[in-house]
Every structure is written in structure tokens, then in C-alpha cells.
Amino acid sequence: METPMPDSVAIVFNGFLALSMKEKIKLVNVLNEFFDHPDPREQIRKSNEATVAGLAAAESGFGCGCCRR
């Protein structure tokens, strides 16, 4: 029997399914890079945090693919 996903994982996976195919491929490539190469993980994390902070600061009307906010 399969173990159910935790709620947080189910929410993120649901958001993943809402992405376009190009976005899904980009995300999978970034995740592969993150897991395949331990050295640049902190750089990947910092880059992502800066991108998200920039989106929040700009209040550009960008909508989250996961929660639609």
C-alpha cells in the first residue's frame, strides 16, 4: 500500500500539475541540478530566494501557479 503524501507535498505537487509543460521541464531540470550536485545547492537556494523576494517586492501582479495568489 502506498503511503499518502503529506499535505504540504500534495499542495506543491498540485501546483506542479497546474504548470505548463515548459514550466514543468524547467522545474524538473532545476531540481535535478539541485540534487545531482551538492556543491551549488546553497547558490541555487539563494538565487531562488532572491527571485521570489524580487517578485514580492515588485508586486508585479505575478500569480502563483500553485495557490493562484
Image: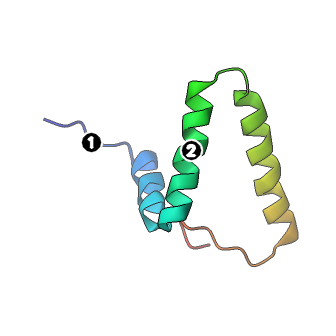
Decide which of tag 2 and tag 1 comes sooner along the chain: 1
Quadrant in which residue 54 is drawn? bottom right
Outermost residue, bottom direction?
Answer: 61
Q: Are marks 2 and 1 in contact (CB under 8 Å)?
A: no
The C terminus lies in which quarter of the figure? bottom right
Indicate which disc residue 21 carries: none
Q: Name the secondary structure under disc 1.
A: loop
Residue 40 is situated, as x and y percent measured from the top left of the image, at 73, 27
Identity of the residue drawn at 52% across and 46% down? 28
Instruction: Determine which residue is flagged by label 1.
Output: 4
Q: Amino acid at mark 2?
A: Asn
Residue 43 is situated, as x and y percent measured from the top left of the image, at 78, 33
Residue 68 is situated, as x and y percent measured from the top left of the image, at 56, 73
Viewer-proximal residue among 14 and 24: 24
- Residue 66 in view in this figure: no
Identity of the residue drawn at 33% across and 43% down? 5
Identity of the residue drawn at 47% across and 64% down? 21
CA–CA distance in space, label 2 to label 1: 25 Å
Task: Answer left or right for 52 relative to 13.
Answer: right
The N terminus lies in which quarter of the figure? top left
Task: Answer left or right for 40 relative to 36.
Answer: right
Instruction: Determine which residue is flagged by label 2.
Output: 29
